[in-house]
């Protein structure tokens, strides 16, 4: 399969596309963090508490309503994403399958709970991130730099999703979220989409983003694409005058000389930035 087989388009998802994008978006992050220690994920405690509460509640309801309830609310949604990941989460799926069949007693549930909570936490966290990002894209706030999104397709099926926006403080393009369907990774698609972003903003002064330090495959990808590392985060409000075109912003940005400082939007700021690493590339 070659890059030439993929088609690219901007800001043109139809209703049926969004569910497929969400599916491989969550699956891609499940894959990225499947072997990551929980303390390195950079996911705040409330998501673990939410996942624990959800899992225990589903089990208790299944005891009274039948284990078809557990199958429908826990196992099937989990397998919906892991179907993209053959050979991954095998033990977790077996545990959930045993419970869904009603073959697990309370001691089995208790002894395997921690094994299941982590992937459910990752699943729920990135489901939420996707829905929030989708809402921001659709809302098209007039007082903010517009969020654009790039889709790749193969035989009309969506295979990649990148969201980004022009940074009015640096003239770089800030890359917000990146997801390539796990079955289409390591085909050069991600690199091609990065180039498409640069082409879409022809007057950009470079690109910038950040990712989790635990996401080793992501860091490897950006390094191979020529990005440099930085942990100098200067979050800014991306308010922009809609009458100012990208060309003027890139020619006369507030920052005269770019360095290794990053200027992500305020809505991307996390409570603790220690688990994250930034990347940037400046245009000559």
Image (tube, rainbow, N blue to C red):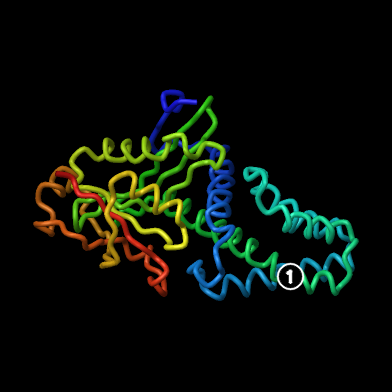
**59 horizontally vs 231: left or right:** right
Residue at 16 percent across and 59 percent down: it is 259
Q: Nearer the viewer, residue 70 or 137?
A: 70
Is 10 rendered above or below residue 250?
A: above
Left or right of 130 in this view: 136: left
Q: Quadrant of residue 60?
A: bottom right
Q: x and y percent of residue 67 in the render?
A: 87, 60
Q: From the viewer's side, name the closer residue of 67 and 37.
A: 37
Question: How far across and down, in percent of the image, does residue 264 sit?
Answer: 30, 61
Residue that carries the numbered disc 1 in the rendered image: 113
Q: Is residue 246 left or right of residue 143?
A: left
**x, y (%) of residue 198?**
27, 40
Based on the displayed image, in which of its 4 quarters is residue 141 positioned? bottom left
Q: Nearer the viewer, residue 213 or 178?
A: 213
Q: Residue shown at 48%/51% (left/top)?
A: 134
Frontmost residue, 69 versus 84: 84
Q: Please give the name of the residue rendered at 41% of the width and 74% of the height, measured from the top-left corner.
A: 272
Coordinates of residue 156 in the picture (x, y in percent) = 52, 27
Q: Is residue 247 left or right of residue 62?
A: left
């Amino acid at each position: 399969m070659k890059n030439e087989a993929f088609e690219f388009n901007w800001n043109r998802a139809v209703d049926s596309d969004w569910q497929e994008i969400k599916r491989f978006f969550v699956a891609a992050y499940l894959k990225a963090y499947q072997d990551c220690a929980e303390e390195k994920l950079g996911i705040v405690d409330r998501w673990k508490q939410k996942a624990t509460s959800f899992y225990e509640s589903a089990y208790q309801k299944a005891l009274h309503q039948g284990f078809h309830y557990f199958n429908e609310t826990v196992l099937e949604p989990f397998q919906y994403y892991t179907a993209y990941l053959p050979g991954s989460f095998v033990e977790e799926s077996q545990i959930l399958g045993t419970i869904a069949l009603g073959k697990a007693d309370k001691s089995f549930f208790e002894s395997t709970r921690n094994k299941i909570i982590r992937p459910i936490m990752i699943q729920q966290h990135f489901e939420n991130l996707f829905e929030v990002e989708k809402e921001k894209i659709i809302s098209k706030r007039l007082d903010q730099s517009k969020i654009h999104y790039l889709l790749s397709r193969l035989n009309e099926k969506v295979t990649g999703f990148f969201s980004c926006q022009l940074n009015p403080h640096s003239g770089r393009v800030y890359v917000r979220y990146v997801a390539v369907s796990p079955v289409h990774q390591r085909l050069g698609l991600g690199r091609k989409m990065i180039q498409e972003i640069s082409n879409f903003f022809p007057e950009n002064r470079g690109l910038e983003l950040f990712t989790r330090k635990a996401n080793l495959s992501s860091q490897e990808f950006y390094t191979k694409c020529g990005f440099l590392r930085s942990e100098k985060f200067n979050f800014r409000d991306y308010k922009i005058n809609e009458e100012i075109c990208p060309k003027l912003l890139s020619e006369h940005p507030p920052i005269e000389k770019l360095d290794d400082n990053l200027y992500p939007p305020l809505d991307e700021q996390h409570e603790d930035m220690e688990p994250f690493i930034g990347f940037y590339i400046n245009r000559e």
